Amino acid sequence: MSTIKIHDKQFKLSIPQEDIEKEIIRVSEAINRDYKGKRPILLGVLNGCFMFASKLMQHLTIECEISFVKLSSYQGTATTGVIKEVIGLSESLTGRDVIIVEDIVDTGLTMQRMMESLGTREPASIEIASLFLKPERLQVPVNVKYSAFTIPDRFIVGYGLDYDGLGRNLPNIYDVVE
Ligand code: 5GP
């Protein structure tokens, strides 16, 4: 299906599953090369990462572990605004090579917060693997070492990404029709 409706919006087919997975395999191969002889821990950021994390793991041939975290948002003071806290992490990261697995980096604020929070746990290294990156939207300097796709400023759904709770199950990526 090339056009779909989710809630009040129309979306059109943008990236078919086959093309998404080709790029994820490319990212897996880069990680296999860069982490040869190491044992990284992948940290998936729920909910959006689940399809990307699954496909990425299937193509990792190095020894590796995976765990998942969530970001909880709560209202801080007037100056701090909404604060995001990393929850659900029970593993020690001391001396570990961490790879954050994210669905999409937009403003970069979420990843900046994750890096700050995980950085206090004394890991040996932290890198980011994101399925999508919107470079035009970045508000803070975030180094996304592994990105499957660089996309323009547009809203997408599918392959784990939602529009107001729906669309995560779509195997392809769809762009919103304005
Ligand atoms: P950031 O903190 O980088 O601005 O936001 C990252 C989060 O915003 C992503 O994890 C995702 O939940 C959401 N997001 C940003 N852009 C999109 C998009 O185009 N589509 C969807 N479905 N979510 C997005």
Image: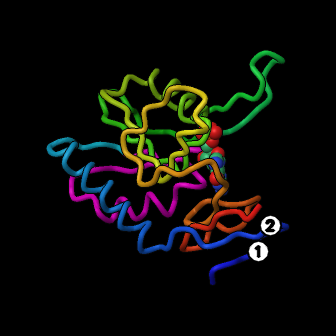
Q: Which residues are magenta?
A: 42-70
Q: Is residue 74 above or below residue 35?
A: above
| Residue 151 image point, x, y percent | 53, 52
| Residue 102 image point, x, y percent | 50, 48
Give the left or right position of residue 82, taking residue 33 as reference: right
- Tell me the amino acid under the disc marked 2: Lys
Residue 62 on the magenta span: yes
Answer with the quarter of the image where residue 1 lies.
Answer: bottom right
* Contact, mark 2 vs mark 1 (Cβ under 8 Å): yes
Q: What residue is disc 1 on? A: 5
Quarter of the picture holding the C terminus: bottom right
Q: Is residue 68 visible?
A: no
Answer with the quarter of the image where residue 174 lies.
Answer: bottom right
Residue at 38%, 22% in the rendered image = 122
Q: Is residue 142 above or below residue 52?
A: above
Label placed on residue 157: none
Give the left or right position of residue 109, taking residue 36 as reference: right
- Tell me the amino acid under the disc marked 1: Lys
| Residue 29 image point, x, y percent | 25, 56
| Residue 158 image point, x, y percent | 60, 66
Compare residues 43 and 153 and report the one nearer the observer: 153
Residue extending furthest toward the left: 37
Q: What residue is disc 2 on? A: 9
Residue at 84%, 18% in the rendered image = 78
